[in-house]
Image (tube, rainbow, N blue to C red):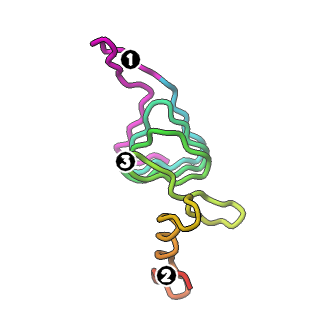
Amino acid sequence: MIAGRVYVTDHDHAWPDGGAALVTAPVVIGDGCWLGEGCAILKGVTLGEGCVVGANAVVTRSAPARSMLVGVPARVVKRYDPGTGKWLAAGPVGSPERRAERAWTFSPTSRSWGGSP
């Protein structure tokens, strides 16, 4: 799925010796990827199947399948675990990503956001 204003490019310009040489590298977008509004996918990037790219993210590096990328430059913040059916924080235990995931979880029973018990 591709939202509006998405930019995908397989080239940019290098300026060696004052010339404007065109530098190219293929872009590969796997099956089932979601590209958010206004994101940019730059040359040489490969997104594995099922990746989700957040709105206005600038993807400068490749990402493995089932990854969620956000930011400028984009970084992987979550990975989908098909075994549990959940998106899990990509950082190591104790990292800011894990703390943020724990602090903001949705409880379907109470229908509210809050910390984990």
Residue 2: where, in percent of width, then height?
45, 46
**Does 17 appear in magenta?**
yes
Give the extent of the magenta segment.
1-24
Task: Say what amino acid the circle numbered 2 marks.
Answer: Gly
Residue 72: where, in percent of width, then height?
37, 48
What SS does tag 3 mark? loop
Q: Residues within 10 Å of mark 2 (few under 14, many from 20)?
A: some
Q: Residue furthest right?
A: 83
Q: Residue furthest bottom?
A: 110
Q: Mark number for residue 22?
A: 1
What SS does tag 2 mark? loop
Question: Which of 112 and 5 lies nearest the eye of the viewer?
Answer: 112
At a point 42% along the width and 31% down the height, the residue shown is 9
At a point 46% along the width and 83% down the height, the residue shown is 112
Check disc 2 and report the residue beneath it: 115
Task: Say what amino acid the circle numbered 3 marks.
Answer: Val
Compare marks 2 and 1 and give the one earlier in the sequence.
Answer: 1
Compare marks 2 and 3 and give the one earlier in the sequence.
Answer: 3
Task: Say what amino acid the circle numbered 1 marks.
Answer: Leu
Q: Is residue 30 left or right of residue 34?
A: right
Q: Mark number for residue 100?
A: none
Check disc 3 and report the residue beneath it: 72
Residue 105: where, in percent of width, then height?
51, 76
